[in-house]
Image: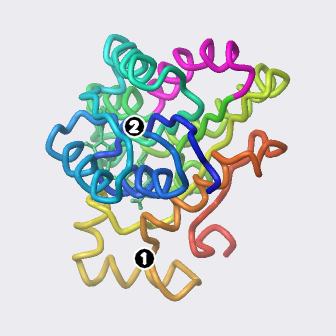
Amino acid sequence: MRLQNKIAIITGAGSGIGRGIALAFVKEGAKVVVADWSEEGGKETVEQIRKINGEVVFVKTDVSKTADIEQMVKTCLDKFGQVDILVNNAGIHRAYNLHEMSEENWDTVLNVNLKSVFLGSKRVIPEMLKQGKGKIISIASIAGLVGFAQSGAYCASKGGIIALTKEMVLEYAPKKINVNCIAPGVIKTVMTKDMITDPATKQFLESSTPYPRLGEPEDIAMAAVYLASDESDFVNGEVLVVDGGWVAK
Ligand SMILES: NC(=O)c1ccc[n+]([C@@H]2O[C@H](COP(=O)([O-])OP(=O)(O)OC[C@H]3O[C@@H](n4cnc5c(N)ncnc54)[C@H](O)[C@@H]3O)[C@@H](O)[C@H]2O)c1
């Protein structure tokens, strides 16, 4: 088992990629905190984890709020005594042309996708410094590497995660805290459901992905297991692209 007795917090674990990561971590021996603002989604993930005899706690969390992040980490420390891994996964997309996007929508996307990485990391780093080791993994996107129409705030937030990841390496790699991110391509989740249901968009997405299928949450979960494990200790500031070849074109 690659994460035996490790304690991991996964945000946005009530659905899609976050749920896939939580389940994969448990299968590798980790105990997990499922953090999500959706109680329904969080409880479903908890149920799936208990079915495979995993140890888990759910915390209702809005990752853009300092008080909620505080509660999330406190719950982890109270229940499990430490935090070895933080996965900043919660994220949202709002589709607008840039000139039609409201300031409120811009702020919401940036706060949920990017400010959350700052807040979560800021809170767990002191714990990881005390422990002398830690792993921070953030879910960026290929939209942080190349442009996607109607995704201005989303692209900016994901590019921001990539830049912040590299900055954090300079401060925390010397303290044995690994900071990396994953840039998924198109993964079949609630976020992409409408796109995949529309035949023309599905055809565009499939034809843009050289590998002959779209991604599944498990594809990202396996990358996260690697970055969370001791096997990746010398990997720092990496943007692990898991996209079936989209950005290789
Ligand atoms: N699906 C894709 O194709 C794709 C591609 C690249 C990157 N991503 C990124 O992967 C991550 C997970 O996305 P997904 O596809 O699993 O989407 P999803 O919509 O299935 O899951 C997102 C989860 O985040 C939770 N969430 C949203 N806002 C939150 C908040 N403020 N506080 C706490 N929880 C919140 C939701 O309740 C949901 O459970 C996101 O950061 C997304 O940007 C997804």
What residue is shown with label 1?
A: 205
Where in the figure is residue 190, as x and y percent of width and height?
26, 59
Quadrant showing the C terminus? bottom right
Would you call the spot at circle 2 few (<14 residues within 10 Å), some (14-19), or many (20 or more)? Answer: many
Disc 1 is placed on an element classified as helix
Q: Quadrant of residue 196?
A: bottom left
Region in magenta: 114-133
**Quick one: which residue is furthest to the front in this view?**
53
Residue 244 screen position, x and y as percent: 58, 75
Q: In which quarter of the image is residue 100?
A: top left
* Nearer to us: label 2 or label 1: 2
The residue at which mark 2 appears reads as: 11
Q: Residue at x 53, y 33 (%)?
A: 86
Separation (CA) of disc 2 from disc 1:
26 Å
**Which amino acid, by three-letter code, is at mark 1?**
Leu
Rendered location of residue 216, percent (x, y):
43, 70
> Does 211 appear above or below 193?
below
